[in-house]
Image (tube, grey):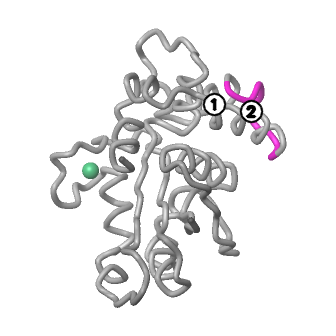
Amino acid sequence: MKLAFCVEDDTDEEVFRILLSRVWKTEVVAEDLRFRRGGWTKALQLAPIIAKVAHQRGLDGAVFAIDNDGATPTHLPSHQDAVPGCRLCELRTAARIQEPLSWPRPDLPPLRYVFAVPVQTIETWLLLARGHDFKGQAESLGRDPNGRAKLKKWLYGMEHPDRDTMRSATLPLAEAFDLEALAKVSPSFAAFLSQLQ
Ligand SMILES: [Zn+2]
């Protein structure tokens, strides 16, 4: 299965690719997009382009993921329309998937579009997955730059890890952690998981 990834950086792409492969029990390959990535604002800009690229190139779909970073409100299933301030709603609105979903796709299954917004960041998910004890306050950290620096320090051992350090801390973890156990302690991960099932 080949997907386009609209994410904040290359490590996020690899983590989500592994998670999707595990849940769908099939190899997921990332389409080589050659867009310059740069945080969540850039991902919002690229979202409608990547949604269409998935159709144009005959891919199986696309994944859109950005960190919540303290944005409020956090997403709820009751958010029917785009709720201002909610990053998941903003991401869905930005991607405008209704357009490519309405285009013909003869001989191919319907496009799959997946949305995820880890609260507060993907480091929160991975630390919880690794068994880090947040003392019940996992989502209160990472709302500001200081908190996000702390999350990085805990996960990678430093605030500004290079790519190899990030890969070696995240990829073996993503391959192996208990998905259902993380869903029990992270509502944003539970929402991601239920969307895939
Ligand atoms: Zn929302």
Disc 1/disc 2 C-alpha distance (Å) = 12 Å
Q: Position of residue 76 (x, y in %)?
A: 23, 42
**Magenta stretch secondary structure, dominant:** loop
Q: Which residues are magenta?
A: 155-163
Q: Position of residue 187 (x, y in %)?
A: 34, 32
Residue type at mark 2: give it.
Answer: Ala
Foreground disc of the pair 1, 2: 1
| Labels in figure, total | 2
Residue at the image position 43 percent from the left and 81 percent from the top: 108
Q: Position of residue 91 (x, y in %)?
A: 38, 61
Q: Nearer the viewer, residue 65 or 90?
A: 65
For residue 6, above or below residue 86:
below
The answer to whether the beta carbon of the residue marked 1 is less than 8 Å from any atom of ligand 1 is no
Residue neighbourhood size for the residue with mark 1, other residues' Cα within 10 Å, grouped as few (<14), some (14–19), many (≥20): few
User: Which SS class for mark 1?
Assistant: helix
**Image mark for residue 176:** 1
Q: Earlier in the sequence, mark 1 or mark 2?
A: 2
The image quadrant of residue 5 is bottom right
- Residue 43 colored in magenta in the image: no
Q: Which residue is mark 2?
A: 169
Residue at the image position 38 percent from the left and 37 percent from the top: 188
The image quadrant of residue 166 is top right
Residue type at mark 1: give it.
Answer: Ala
- Residue 161 colored in magenta in the image: yes
